[in-house]
Every structure is written in structure tokens, then in C-alpha cells.
Amino acid sequence: MKRVFSAVIDTLWLAALYYGLVHGVDGALNVGLFLAWLMFALSFGVFIPEAGEEIGEAPVWAIARSVVFDIAAIALLAWHGWMFTAAAVAWTTIIGFGAWSNNRKGGIQA
């Protein structure tokens, strides 16, 4: 259920960024940017050992989906000139993937 919730949140976040940046919906842009910076702030929580262990339990497909969504968001943000926010999302992606790979139990097999 955690993975489904994560997928729904990622989809809504990317949709908010898309409609805000591409179609000029201000409310959607505000929500998308708020969530981007919230994720950036929360990314520092992976340095807590218990959080890193929980991230390490995620299956490969869940991490791959998250990384693909993040790359799409980074490209969308950078295309529209939101460079600092794109860098913050890139930081979040790199830190999250690093925490997952460092705490992965049983290697990186799918």
C-alpha cells in the first residue's frame, strides 16, 4: 500500500508541475513547487539510520519509477527556467537513490 501511495503522490506532483508550468495554472504551480521544496527539506532525513534502512527495503521497480518521475520533473523545471528548484529535485533524487543503494539488502537484483 505504501508503494501505491507513493506512486499516486508522484503522479499528482508531476501533474501539478506540468499544469502549472506548461498551462499556466498558478495554483498547480504553487503546489508543485511547494512539494518539490518539501521533498528537498525532507531528503536530509535519509541521514538518520532508521530512515535509510526503510528506504533500502524498497523494490527496484519502485525506486526506478521514482527516479523516472524525478528526471521528468527536473527536465520540466529546467526547461521552464526553474534552475534552483530543478537542482533541489536533483539533490533529492541523488540522495534518495544513494540511501537506497547503500542500504539495499541482498544487492541490486530485481
Image: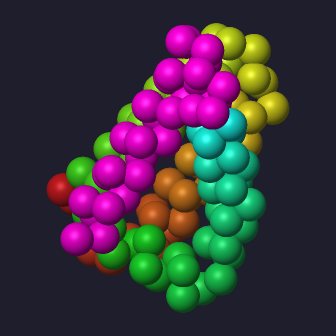
Q: Is residue 101 above or below residue 84?
A: below
Question: Secondary structure of the magenta portion, mostly?
Answer: helix
Residue closer to the observer: 96 or 38: 38
Q: Is residue 106 visible?
A: yes
Q: Is residue 89 visible?
A: no
Which residues fall within the magenta stretch?
A: 1-29
Image colouring: rainbow
The x and y percentages for residue 18 are 50, 23
Q: Is residue 46 above or below residue 61?
A: below
- Residue 3 on the magenta span: yes
Asked if residue 106 lies left or right of residue 36, the reply is left
Q: Please, which residue is most extreme toward the bottom here?
A: 50
Q: Is residue 110 above or below residue 49?
A: above
Q: Residue at x 33, y 51 (%)?
A: 8
Query: Which image quadrant is residue 81 in?
Result: top right
The x and y percentages for residue 36 are 64, 45
Instruction: Count the labels in the image.
Output: 0
Q: Residue at x 53, y 76 (%)?
A: 52
The x and y percentages for residue 106 are 27, 74
Asked if residue 77 lies left or right of residue 72, the reply is right
Residue closer to the observer: 48 or 77: 77
Q: Is residue 41 above or below residue 19?
A: below
Q: Residue at x 54, y 65 (%)?
A: 99
Residue closer to the observer: 57 or 18: 18
Residue closer to the observer: 97 or 26: 26
